Amino acid sequence: MNVLLWHVHGSWTTSFVHGKHHYLVPVTPDRGPYGLGRARTYPWPDTAVEITPDQLATTDVDLVILQRPEELDLATRWLGRRPGHDLPAIYVEHNTPKGDVPNTRHPMADRDDLLIAHVTHFNELFWDTGGTRTAVVEHGILPPRHEWSGELDRLAVVTNEPVRRWRVTGTDLMPRFAQVAPLDVFGMGVAGLPEALARAGAPDGLPVTGHDDLPQDRMHAEVARRRAYLHLCRWTSLGLSLIEAMAIGMPIVALATTEAVDAVPADAGVLSTRVESLVEAARWLTTDRDAAARLGARGREVAKERFGLDRFLTDWDRLMEEETCGSR
């Protein structure tokens, strides 16, 4: 199939475009949020091609993958066809609901012209989608090329925009862990993090280092050298970086919130809503490398079994086939 989708979430899209289809990724001269084109820091196959809005008007498209509400009108203008009416459409919901939780209405609620595909069962549970059909396709990842060594008595965090998002990403909790072991924070928008923590009243000289927007493979290599993976997100969908850390073989220390509770078994890490319990877990794992190795090995098994790329692509093939066949 020719599948139109925008480049929104790099890690998820990387997995998605490794399927057997032809993926049309919009690109605009400014490479803005609605024309980002191919990823530059993730490995994408040649079957994912950039396409301009003008080209889309004369291109055969079998299915539209929507990920933001405004893409519905955008696709209608660029294609000259209405997703959900003139060609099938699936709306992928990556995020937990915002606003009046748990009563938040989904922007695609009560529609009979598309399907909402959630990436976690937690999201499906918490979003009010009314009469719109829903499905869940859990994450799948490309196996990281690097394995955990844990040679550095440091904690790794992977998160995007921790300064702007602050409490959402648990940035305010980082100083408590940095007093146990040095923190290395990887992701987009992490530059200036130590200064932001200091402005917020964190003690001077905390060992927190930001590593801004490294290529994925290099980031995995660096994360694998840290003793444990720290996941402090209060309210976010299940991050692919958490699954990747498990696949690398890292022990997990995480807030017991949203889908993380179901994704990380008790013998692969420590999860709690008591921050002090997590601080003690971080202290334990940075001093007991054998325990860290044991938990990490179990996490690697779980990631391989549950979040493998083949399972992810098979689930998506089934869902896309059902939608395209049902529309004929």
Image: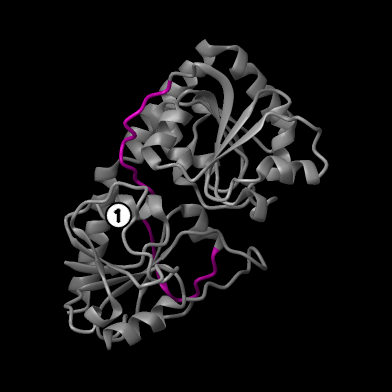
Residue 183, how many percent across, how many down?
62, 30
Q: From the viewer's perspective, is 196 left or right of 28?
A: right
Which residue is located at x 78 percent, y 41 percent?
198
Image quarter of residue 324? bottom left
Residue 51, how many percent across, how many down?
25, 71
**Looking at the image, which residue sits at the far front?**
29
Camera-side residue: 13 or 53?
Answer: 53
Query: What residue type is disc 1 on?
Result: Phe
Image quarter of residue 88? bottom left
Magenta residues (range):
127-148
Residue 175, how many percent across, how many down?
73, 34
328 relative to 117, above or below? below
Q: Quadrant of the N terminus?
A: bottom left
Residue behind mark 1: 16
171 relative to 82, above or below? above
One can see residue 40 in this view? yes
Q: From the viewer's perspective, is 152 left or right of 100?
A: left
Q: Is mark 1 on a helix, strand or loop?
A: helix
Q: From the viewer's perspective, is 234 left or right of 244?
A: right
Please say whether residue 164 is one of the residues in the magenta stretch. Answer: no
Classified by dominant secondary structure, the portion drawn in magenta counts as loop
Which residue is located at x 42 percent, y 55 percent?
119
Q: From the viewer's perspective, is 257 left or right of 122?
A: right
27 relative to 155, above or below? below
